[in-house]
Image (cartoon, grey):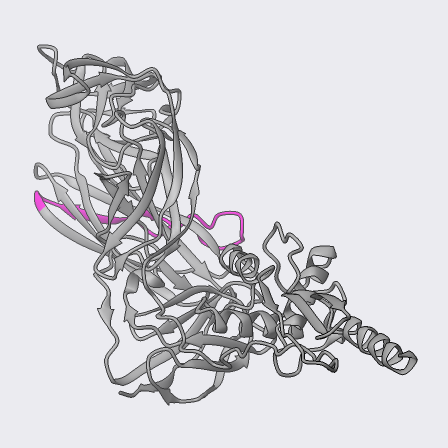
Amino acid sequence: MYYMNKVITAGIIALSLLTTGVASAQSYSYGSPYSYSQTYSYGTCNQISRDLSRGMRGSDVSALQSFLVAQNYSGSGSWMVTGFFGTATAVAVQNFQRSHNLPVSGIADSWTRAAIMSSCGNTYPTTPTYPSYPTYPTYPTYPTYPTYPTYPTQNVVSITSLTPNTATSGSVVTIYGSGFDQTNTVYVGSTAVPSTSYGGTTITFTVPAFLSGTQQVYVANTRGTSNSLPLTISSNNCAYTSNYYGGNCYNPCTYNCNTGALSVSYLNPSSGAVGSNVTIIGSGFSATGNTVHFGQGIIAGAISSDGNSVSFTVPTTLTGYGSQQTQLGTYPVSVTNSSGASSNSVQYTVTSLGTTNAPVITSVNGPSNLQAGVSGTWTVNVTTYGNQNTLVNAAWGDTGNGYVNAAAPQNLYGSGAQTVTFTHAYVTQGTYTATFTVSNNNGQSNVYTMTVYVSGNANNQVTLSYLSPTSGRIGTQVMLSGTGFAQNDNTVHFGTGGTMHVPSYGNTIYFTIPSYISVCDVTPGTNCFAAQAVTPGTYQIYITNSNGQTNQLTFTVTQ
């Protein structure tokens, strides 16, 4: 009996030395026959309440590392439990993400943490019954995990966050995610709402006035349907004024909302001649269906590409509440958006009535993204009225950097559609506003602005040395090696698409070959097209970041 107790005690001590994160419970009963039972719980259930990534420290990092060690991946061990999130921890997170069909980012994000919580705390009982003579317990068998599962499909449509996630009717909400196209359908609950896409990572929409409570928001486009996130819509004192019966809206349905979300800050310019183009700067504008109130006049159907600006032309005749000619003087300007919310008003002063219509810049064609030190070309399309001289000016917005900020004015004569061309190179990275102005002899003018994103500096270099591998199927993870990579914000270009905001690990970036590509994935703005499926063939890969653009290398997609 003494020998048997000694051996059983040694077995208990051995079991207590199991890897951190594995808890076991045992019970013994002696008699005839002898019996033994045990249960064990795989993994630790310490709560991890924030996203964890490289360079972070804390007790929650230790808890994550203890859990990962308990996964028994090749190369892991208790030496990893340091409380510092380093390369080994990132690789262990990637292994876990692969085994659970999650995006392999190496970051313990909300999806990964949810998978951790659902994986731990599961109890596996075993209750063997033994014959006349007792046998000694053996170590429990660990479950087998797949080493390299199939990579998840990349570049599908996905939502990561809403800003804000609590809003009032008529306010503007921005959706952040990936895989957005130029044309997307945004659903708030079961209601499809108008939206505007600014590339592959953001969409804005205006909260409809007739919705309230918590609604699920999701996006659908040619790639598929995204996950959904909750949006809490609070009361905004909207009062329906016509054709609203029994909870239903019958066209035309109007409502009066005073949410405080719609406001006008200032006008650019705040004075000018009849025919001048004026931009209203504020917030809460609808993507479409805004109404500009100019004195007693109404200018309907104004659009806003960003929710913060609306443009209109100073009318020669005020219509909407009767009709009267615009006179010299000051007029209040306000906006009503598509939800019926009305803004405050600011003043615009008419300084000239003119003898002809003001010339108009109908469009400007040129780069909105440019590398520092590289010249860009902008073509300005102008419509003039009357046979008189018209001047076209370009100001580049880089005043204060010691560089020339304006181009020499170009002169046009006559009426009709005409074009002029300007070139300019920015020396320093940053975001600039290029302003194009057209004016005639009567002092009438119009202004057209566009934003230019300049990356890198003229003296910095970013290079791409090689790819590993250089060919593979959709879902293949490729290692991109080079120099000059940004730590957290690189854009990997793959054909016409790619992925933005990719981190680097020193001189290495990891990129997964996507199943769909679109220019929306890598270029902010609206000039993009629906996603296209990646088919077998050769694609160019290169990287852009704040240091500039690399050379291009070739990757071959196989069957």
Q: Is residue 310 above or below residue 435?
A: above
Magenta segment boundaries in residue numbering:
394-416
Q: Pick whichever, 81 or 188, lies toward us.
A: 81
Q: Quadrant of residue 245?
A: top left
Residue 398 lies in the magenta-colored region: yes
Q: Pick whichever, 367 or 140, lies toward us.
A: 140
Q: Pick whichever, 136 or 442, lies toward us.
A: 136
Residue 317 lies in the magenta-colored region: no
- Secondary structure, magenta segment, majority class: loop
Q: Position of residue 407 (x, y in %)?
A: 35, 52
Q: Is residue 112 left or right of residue 311?
A: right
Quadrant, the C terminus: bottom left
Residue 459: tell me if it is visible.
no
The residue under the point 45% across, 54% down is 404
Q: Is residue 416 left or right of residue 230?
A: left
Q: Position of residue 235 (x, y in %)?
A: 37, 20
Q: Pick whichever, 9 or 139, lies toward us.
A: 9
Q: Is residue 333 left or right of residue 432?
A: left
Q: Position of residue 424 (x, y in %)?
A: 37, 59
Q: Is residue 349 above or below residue 117?
A: above
Q: Quadrant of residue 449?
A: top left
Quadrant, the N terminus: bottom right
Residue 78: tell me if it is visible.
yes
Q: Is residue 552 above or below residue 311?
A: below
The residue under the point 17% across, 38% down is 359
Toward the right, the furthest residue is 2
The residue under the point 69% across, 79% down is 139
Q: Is residue 266 left or right of residue 80?
A: left
